[in-house]
């Protein structure tokens, strides 16, 4: 038979989703995949039920229901400092995942390069390859996950079409500062490069951290695609409603790609999302408060169990150095360690190597998520502190 697609041989399946399957088979505690195990807000669930009951069950407007695009436009003007026309600048997609690949397919030509900060969310590398680009990686250095300005500047060249910025960052919890984003913006202007900003964790911030949208900075409105979703903020990761905000010329291309990828995001969930965006400030404060307490709790448990980790400033992950615990188990490989951890404690995590192109860089790291209910977090803490060898 003829050969199958060569490009699909250049990347693996999602390690995160694989660890979820292993966890489910073991009946363990899933601290690998970033979805809550508590219920989503009643108000947004009720809104979805109403939309279904009112007959909003057929194809939506392909690029997003008008009510949702209007709500997104109001929201980003208030919170992100981004002015956009809901008629021409917004594409509603099947989650931020589709928004990212549709954006890259709309931007990239063969021979283009994309800059990605490493460690990175695992989709970005395959997305770059599938779009036809060559990824170039710039290291984020722990424990504070800073980058080298010289290394960043050296990554830009005449082939650089885009840079992906994920802030707050998965897997590190880094929140890019205004100064860092201004530096990135200056390089984008210098090299005529697009910024693709994945801001899905924008409301999950700690210790006074500020979320800054690079699209709001001078000179960046026309060259930024801002990607987001309702998944994390409203705890509905299974609804698959996201969006991309960009200038009309870019949006036209994103909409065409999106149309042939998926036609449209689920209609009733779009209407529920529009209602959720009217939640008052107390909702977002409660969200940050819950995750802040969960972060402090799980970090204390991880440190007691022997993991080395710093406080993330955003998102709901902690990327740990597992060297001490691995040595106690006689292991040197992060994947073997993650599997052993499920066997011994029932706790599922993500091997750190999945966040690096050079796998050895993450071979002593594992990522835990803490977007879980208190019963789960307390059970995890007990398992890690009692079931691992001392």
Image: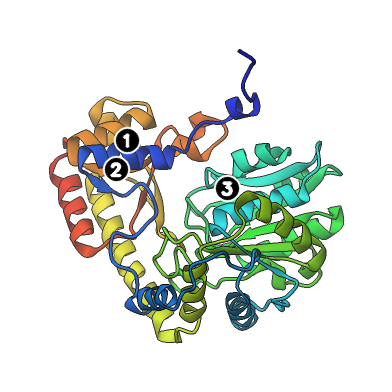
Circle 1 crowding by C-alpha within 10 Å: few under 14, some 14–19, many from 20: many
Mark sitting on residue 140: 3
Q: Which of 278 and 302 is in front in this view?
A: 278
Compared with residue 303, is residue 73 higher up or lower down, i.e. above or below?
below
Point out the tag, 3 or 2, that comes first from the N-terminus.
3
Q: Residue at x 38, y 27 (%)?
A: 333
In the picture of the structure, the residue carrying the numbered disc 1 is 338
Q: Residue at x 63, y 77 (%)?
A: 66
Compared with residue 228, is residue 259 higher up or lower down, i.e. above or below?
above
Q: In this view, does 121 lie to the left or right of 302?
A: right
Q: Position of residue 19 (x, y in %)?
A: 35, 39
Mark sitting on residue 134: none
Quarter of the image containing the C terminus? Answer: top left
Q: Residue at x 40, y 59 (%)?
A: 316
Measure the C-alpha gap from mark 3 to mark 2.
25 Å
Local secondary structure at mark 3 = strand
In the picture of the structure, the residue carrying the numbered disc 2 is 348
Q: In this view, does 102 lie to the left or right of 337?
A: right
Measure the C-alpha gap from mark 2 to mark 1.
7 Å
Tell me, yes or no, whether the two marked residues, 2 and 1, touch with CB atoms within 8 Å: yes
Q: Position of residue 60 (x, y in %)?
A: 58, 67
Q: Where is residue 258 in the image (x, y as percent from the top left)?
A: 66, 55
């Amino acid at each position: 038979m003829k050969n199958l697609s060569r490009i699909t041989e250049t990347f693996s399946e999602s390690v995160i989703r694989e660890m979820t399957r292993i966890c489910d088979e073991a009946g363990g505690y899933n601290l690998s995949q970033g979805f809550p195990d508590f219920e989503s807000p009643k108000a947004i669930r009720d809104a979805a039920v109403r939309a279904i009951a009112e007959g909003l069950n057929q194809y939506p407007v392909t690029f997003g229901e008008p009510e949702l695009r209007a709500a997104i436009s109001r929201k980003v003007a208030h919170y992100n400092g981004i002015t956009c026309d809901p008629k021409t600048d917004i594409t509603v997609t099947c989650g931020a995942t589709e928004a990212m690949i549709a954006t890259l397919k709309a931007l990239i030509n063969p021979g283009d390069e994309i800059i990605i900060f490493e460690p990175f969310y695992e989709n970005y590398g395959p997305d770059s390859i599938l779009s036809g680009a060559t990824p170039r990686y710039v290291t984020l250095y722990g424990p504070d996950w800073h980058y080298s300005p010289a290394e960043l500047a050296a990554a830009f060249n005449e082939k650089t079409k885009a840079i992906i910025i994920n802030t707050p960052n998965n897997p590190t919890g880094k929140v890019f500062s205004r100064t860092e984003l201004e530096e990135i913006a200056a390089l984008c202007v210098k090299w005529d490069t697009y910024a693709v900003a994945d801001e899905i964790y924008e409301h999950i911030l700690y210790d006074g951290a500020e979320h800054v949208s690079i699209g709001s900075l001078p000179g960046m409105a026309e060259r930024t695609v801002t990607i987001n979703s309702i998944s994390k903020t409203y705890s509905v990761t299974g609804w698959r409603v996201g969006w991309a905000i960009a200038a009309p010329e870019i949006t036209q291309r994103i909409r065409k790609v999106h149309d042939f990828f998926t036609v449209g995001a689920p209609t009733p969930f779009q209407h529920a999302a529009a209602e959720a965006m009217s939640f008052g400030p107390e909702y977002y404060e409660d969200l940050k408060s819950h995750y802040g307490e969960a972060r402090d709790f799980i970090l204390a448990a991880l440190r007691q169990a022997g993991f080395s980790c710093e406080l993330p400033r955003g998102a709901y992950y902690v990327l740990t150095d597992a060297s001490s615990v691995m040595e106690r188990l006689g292991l040197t490989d992060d994947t073997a360690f993650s599997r052993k951890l499920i066997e011994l404690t029932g706790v599922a995590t993500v091997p750190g190597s999945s966040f690096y192109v050079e796998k050895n860089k993450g071979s002593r790291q594992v990522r835990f998520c803490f977007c879980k209910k208190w019963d789960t977090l307390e059970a995890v803490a007990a398992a890690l502190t009692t079931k691992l060898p001392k």
